[in-house]
Image (cartoon, helix red, strand yellow):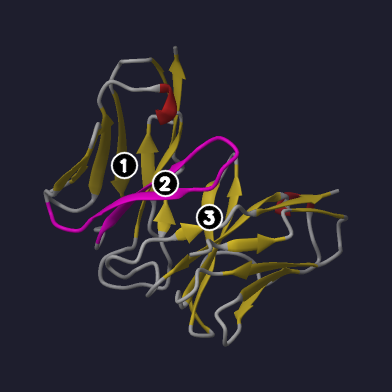
Amino acid sequence: GQQVMQIPQYQHVQEGEDFTTYCNSSTTLSNIQWYKQRPGGHPVFLIQLVKSGEVKKQKRLTFQFGEAKKNSSLHITATQTTDVGTYFCAGPESGGGADGLTFGKGTHLIIQP
Amino acid sequence: KAGVTQTPRYLIKTRGQQVTLSCSPISGHRSVSWYQQTPGQGLQFLFEYFSETQRNKGNFPGRFSGRQFSNSRSEMNVSTLELGDSALYLCASSLQGSRSYNSPLHFGNGTRLTVT
């Protein structure tokens, strides 16, 4: 079945440093979605990318969808303590399928003040 | 608009028992998905319902079942509980289903199930 891999699993950064997490799917995705889960909370939707090579920005966050629609990245510029949490990518397999949205295992962002 | 509501928040059961978890989606959302979250395996898809029909199913044993009612509320049942079923069970609703464009998942706070 479809697998979605995320690296790194954990990332420690100093406040103010940049952060990037990478997502790779074993199959082509019809779209890629990113979610953020704060410690003790539930995943919250951040953004959806649909087109090959698409780039979207939300303030300090930049999201990219690969040309082959099998990989994606999330880059945070100048991290702040409010960015702490786990970032998940998720995507439905292109062409239909019996699975729902497959999530990566997430990247835990830890920020040291 | 009220968010996704899951009850109960916490549950402690013993091996062999069964449990039913409840989820009320955001008003107007017709799709409800269920996920199991554990530290080791992350978010694993259980099943998705749309207008009372199971649309998608993950790779879980038959002990895990669910249903959706005409008001879109959903329940998940786990029978013959095992220690490994201890997890956070998350319900998420969406307007047209998780595979649809512009139909993101809205998660509830989850039910923390502990099996002893």
Vertical position of residue A79 compared to residue B36: above or below: above
Q: Is residue B57 visible?
A: no
Q: Mark 3 highlights which residue?
A: B44
Q: Chain of mark 2?
A: A
Q: Is residue B98 visible?
A: yes
Q: Residue furthest bottom?
A: B70
Spot occupied by residue B111 in the image (x, y as percentages of width and height): 68, 55
Q: Mark 1 highlights which residue?
A: A23
Q: Few, some or many C-alpha atoms within 10 Å of disc 1 (few <14, some 14-19, many ≥20)? A: many
Q: Mark 2 highlights which residue?
A: A104
Residue type at numbered disc 1: Cys
Magenta highlight range: A31-52
Question: Disc 2, disc 1: CB below 8 Å?
Answer: yes
Q: Are marks 3 and 1 on the same chain?
A: no
Q: CA distance from mark 3 to mark 2?
A: 9 Å
Residue B90 is left or right of residue A93, and the answer is right
Q: Are marks 3 and 2 on the same chain?
A: no
Residue B33 is left or right of residue A66, and the answer is right
Which residue occupies 31% across, 73% down?
A96
Vertical position of residue A29 compared to residue A14: above or below: below
Q: Secondary structure at mark 1?
A: strand
Question: Disc 3, disc 2: CB below 8 Å?
Answer: no
Give whichever of A104, B12 is nearer the camera. B12
Spot occupied by residue B60 in the image (x, y as percentages of width and height): 60, 64
Which residue occupies 62% across, 68% down?
B23
Vertical position of residue B88 compared to residue A21: above or below: below
* Nearer-N-terminus badge (2/1): 1
Residue B44 is left or right of residue A82, and the answer is right
Which residue occupies 45% across, 74% down?
B29
Q: Secondary structure at mark 2?
A: loop
Spot occupied by residue A92 in the image (x, y as percentages of width and height): 34, 62
Q: Few, some or many C-alpha atoms within 10 Å of disc 2 (few <14, some 14-19, many ≥20)? A: many
